Image: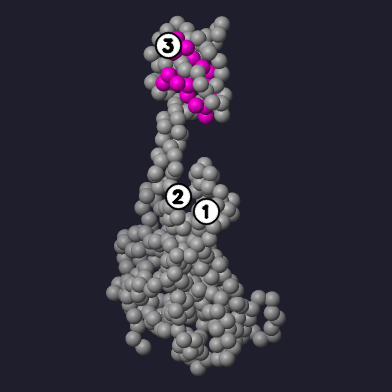
Amino acid sequence: MKLLSYETSQNMLDLLQVNSNRYENIALSSSLGRVLFEDIVAEFNDPQFPTASMDGYAVIHSDLGEKSIKILGDNPAGHEENRAVSTGESIKTFTGSMMPCGADTLIQIENVSVNDGCIIVDEMVSLGSSVRPIGEGYRAGEVLIKKGTEIGFAQIGVMAGLNKVMIKVALRPRIAVISTGNEILDLGINSDNPSQIRSSNNYTLAALFEQAGAEVIQLGTVGDNRDSIMHTFENALSCADILVSTGGVSVGDYDFVKDIVPRLGAEIVYKGVAIKPGKHILVAQKSDKFVLALPGFAYSSTVTSILYVLPLIAKMLGRKNAYKTVEAKLSENFIKRSKLTEFTACNVVVEDGEYFVNFEGKKVGSSAILTNMLDNSALMIAGQDDGDLEKGTFVNVILLEIF
């Protein structure tokens, strides 16, 4: 079987046309973790007028050299101050209050003494001290949050300040997840057959896809039966944007998935990529829906999901990147195990702003060792043309905690 190069497979994946124009309006209070479908643009300046940033007295800076300055009264926050400050006058002004007209400086309470209705300057301040100028936070017309941004606490706070009650967010792509194989036993099912293994792929991938912003339809497991798999896949494609299956894509007698996908009416984009793990991956498209049939081993299905499913999710959400890739330096020698592009679980350490890679605690073995991805692991990429790599070599690393 002729295998596609990893770089070519990624280019072809990037060229796939997806529906990224779907959105819904939701309440700001329910938007945490969602992806913005619109730019958030400031409609006004913040602040809209010079504002006190501390408690103190609004004064004319040139008056601070005088013996005393008369206090006209108080200016509490939220009060519409109509009085103007003239030479020799001050108004007690509190944090967040509009600065009175004529005043150019706020001298903090701690810097003055009060005597007989006047302030006496104990410590000088500079011109404009403790005054927020118009537009200090942002200017009208400024794009504050870009379309495609995942909404976190800071985004919610900024939008609340803009009085955004309802916002547009990208519609979550729906992904159906299914594990195939007679040897797979779903959680909670009793068995006296020691050759069966617990299903973990569908739970691992469901969590991965939800973390990336998708809505997951959990379909559990199905045995190696053509009709059962066909029926399950047809139902999945009727309600999901992407169908992700694990198992049944290799060359064994019971690997039915690779034969069933074309019978669904899906066009095979490619089957077989020169990567380790996951070389038997199959990518297909039916209209605006996609089928990704992945290998059955836990580590293999997880890695291929990161490389091929997450980019589709990102495109559907209108996001530019599915994950972050950085350049890092090897802290130890690396022995390459194949002539394919390899994705190896590793640890990443940051020292003085530079990334370093090591493999402490990572087991060398089959593509079934999912525990290698514990403890904030990353994926180190060794290219198809690379051989063994020496300590100090720079490599590319996919950071898994950032999607």
Q: Which mark is residue 40?
A: 2
Q: Which mark is residue 87?
A: 3
Is residue 361 visible from the viewing direction of this image? Answer: no
Whether label 1 touches label 2, CB < 8 Å: yes
Q: Residue at x 42, y 71 (%)?
A: 18
Mark toward the start of the polypeptide (3 vs 1): 3
Whether label 3 touches label 2, CB < 8 Å: no
Q: Is residue 88 magenta?
A: yes
Crowd tier of the residue under label 3, counting other residues whose Cα lies within 10 Å: few below 14, some 14–19, many 20 or above: some
Residue 284 image-quadrant placement: bottom left
In terms of secondary structure, what is the magenta stretch mainly? loop
Give the labeled residue for mark 1.
167
Image quadrant where one finds the N terminus: bottom left
Q: Calculate the distance from the C-alpha at mark 3 to the C-alpha at mark 1.
A: 48 Å
From the viewer's perspective, is residue 230 above or below residue 166? below
Q: Residue flagged by tag 1: what amino acid is it? A: Ile
User: Under tag 3, what secondary structure?
Assistant: loop
User: Under tag 2, what secondary structure?
Assistant: strand
First to last magenta residue range: 86-104
Q: Residue flagged by tag 2: what amino acid is it? A: Ile
From the viewer's perspective, is residue 161 above or below residue 122? below
Q: Residue at x 40, y 23 (%)?
A: 128
